[in-house]
Amino acid sequence: MDVRQLRYFLAVVDHGSVHRAARELFVAQPSVSQALRALERDLGAELFHRTGRRLVLTAAGEGLVEPARDVLAGLRLARDTVEAVEGLRGGRLLISAMPSQAVSPLAGMIGRFAARHPDVEVVVRAGATPPEVLDAVRVGAAELGVLGAARRPEPAGMVVTPLATQRFVLVAAAPGDLPAGGPVSPAALAGVRLIAGQRGTVMRRAADDIVRAAPGSRIAVEVEHREAVLPLVLAGVGVAVLSESWRQLALDAGLAVRDLDSPEVLHVCLVHRTGRLSPAAREFTNQ
């Protein structure tokens, strides 16, 4: 077993096929296939069920994912620590973040970090829900995570640092589409067409509270892609329920924004595994 085999194995896990993994690694597809077969021989176990071109992890493959990520993370940590002796002059910082928290506070945090360490590449990967972000950090797909949850998470083996508490706002195409003043009570939104997040999110719960309180109101569009929400409002589809992290972007787009009188809030946290951080992650968390 060697590092190259583990890197190729994880590339297949992350990208779903040998073809996509080879493309991402900038190597020939047979090189990836040969490395996987050699790794399986070394371990004495099949790592994937092969159904045509589709690869599905076996139980042995599932068990290898986290240790493999730990090995590669340890190598990155060793390299980055040596490089950081004379300052952060390179390296790569992987962050998993939920969409709204990627807008704020993560964008500002990256801006401040990049101003001090312009040579460090920051990679932000999407996590739709708190469990997705936590899982990315847990298995080493990201070193840091930024998430917003109804309650502050307390995952085993992780350090959780509170960053902010975000409330919810209403975003409409024109001021006349919303009651004047604020915060706006859900009961005052009778007949409103809502653009809301997917079920199971706190954003969706805030929208459902409006539907229950305001006669004739309904969910017009359920959307997982947060980047589509403001264009939908601009197109006149309805009124969006968003976390307040979107406030400035909505105002910059010329939209009307009102605070929503809702008990729902998001507890925004930075998470990472216990143990030693890379120099770049350590600098990022010390902001």
Image (cartoon, grey):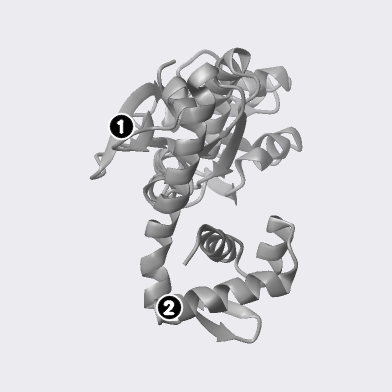
Please state the horizontal and vertical placement of residue 150, each as a whole percent of the image: 33, 37
How far apart are the two marked residues, 1 and 2, measured between alpha carbons?
Answer: 32 Å
Please state the horizontal and vertical placement of residue 28, each as a whole percent of the image: 75, 67
Question: Residue 153 is drawn in which quadrant?
Answer: top left
Position of residue 220 in the picture relative to residue 1 (left or right): right
Disc assigned to residue 160: 1
Q: Is mark 2 on a helix, strand or loop?
A: loop
Please state the horizontal and vertical placement of residue 76, each as a whole percent of the image: 50, 41
Work out whether residue 86 or residue 276 is closer to the camera in this orientation and state it: 86
N-terminal of the pair, mark 1 or mark 2, is 2
Q: Name the residue under label 2.
A: 58
Please state the horizontal and vertical placement of residue 144, each as a whole percent of the image: 44, 36
Q: Residue at left 74%, top 33%?
A: 234
The crowd level at tag 2 (other Cα within 10 Å; few <14, some 14-19, many 20+) is: some
Q: Residue at left 42%, top 62%?
A: 65
User: In the figure, 19 relative to 257: above or below?
Assistant: below
Question: Residue 102 is drawn in which quadrant?
Answer: top right
**Amino acid, disc 1:** Val
Work out whether residue 37 or residue 254 is closer to the camera in this orientation and state it: 37
Question: Residue 261 is drawn in which quadrant?
Answer: top left
Quadrant (top left, top right, bottom left, bottom right) of the C terminus: top left
